[in-house]
Image (cartoon, rainbow, N blue to C red):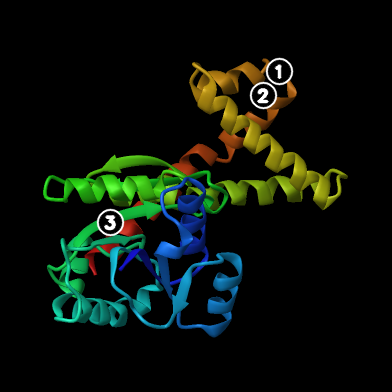
Amino acid sequence: MFEICFLGGGKMASAILDGAHSAGVVELDAVHVVERLEESRISLSTRFTGVSVSEDLEPAKLYVLATKPQDVSNIAKSARALVDGDSVSWNEPPILVSIAAGITRVRLESLFGDGFRIVRTMPNTAVAVKSGVVAICDDPDVDRPALDRVEELFSGVAHIVRVPEAKVDAVTAISGSGPAYFMYLVEAMEEAGVTIGLTADMARELAICTMAGSAKLAATSSSTPRQLRLDVTSPGGTTAQAIRVFDRGGLRSTIMEAVIACYERAKELDSK
């Protein structure tokens, strides 16, 4: 029996596997990946020497649901048949970790049955560089050892927060979709940089490095983000002029409206 079986071998699954192996959470020869695309199977086998990769589901102590939403129903049928069947002797119910957006734990239980200890999570794409954020849904009826094992799994790739599932849509709106907000800002700064005479590469480099440095400053400083902003904003200076344009255009309100819209869409998906 494998320690971990990934149901889907895409970028997020690869990032989690890489981080878990680097952190010593699991050995590669204890991992199986279910992947239907031959090209992806070859790529995974080349990148992760020792990992078992095939189209077939295998018994495991922990499953990571990392497939596309449209494929969840089919993989659930196979997983349910495996756990409910007589071909495998299970010492305890396997853990099922979902990283899929818009699929509630109740929905997962209806698809996979009661043979799994289900834990819902919300990672973001920065797990690919071991700097992600992962929210783990922590409700009173969720198995405690399963929660601890899932936190261990993600410990090598992300900052981890535990939240009630009722808050996961709000988390989605901040950290789940958050990388796209910052990339959008970088795009705009790059375009502005080109307009004022920089090359696109130089403008992008400056914007990305400034974003990374500012994030580190905000994370390590005892000052609030507001105070850190004011530290750069001299009265009548260049930064003050930029902030004045932001305020005149209603940027703060636009950002708030965008995050709230993301939240409302996440709730809508959860209700389907």
- In space, the residues marked 1 and 3 are separated at their CA atoms by 49 Å
Pair 1/3: label in front: 3
**Label 2 Cα neighbours within 10 Å, binned few <14 / some 14-19 / many ≥20:** some
- The type of residue carrying mark 1 is Gly
Which residue is nearer to you in this view: 162 or 171?
A: 162
Are the residues at dot 1 and dot 2 in contact (C-beta closer than 8 Å)?
yes
Q: Which residue does the image show at 26% across and 42% down from the upper left?
A: 163
Are the residues at dot 3 and dot 2 in contact (C-beta closer than 8 Å)?
no
Q: Quadrant of residue 68?
A: bottom left
User: Circle 3 sits on which residue?
Assistant: 120
**Label 1 Cα neighbours within 10 Å, binned few <14 / some 14-19 / many ≥20:** few
Percent coordinates x, y for residue 200 in the rendering:
81, 52
Q: Secondary structure at mark 3?
A: strand
Q: Secondary structure at mark 1?
A: loop
Percent coordinates x, y for residue 70 in the rendering:
36, 78
Q: Is residue 217 above or below residue 97?
A: above
User: Circle 1 sits on which residue?
Assistant: 236
Percent coordinates x, y for residue 173 in the rendering:
39, 49
Which residue is nearer to you in this view: 45 or 124?
A: 45
For marks 1 and 3 on the same chain, the one whose residue lies earlier in the sequence: 3
Which residue is nearer to you in this view: 141 or 170?
A: 141
Q: Which residue does the image show at 70% across and 45% down from the upper left?
A: 189
User: Circle 2 sits on which residue?
Assistant: 240
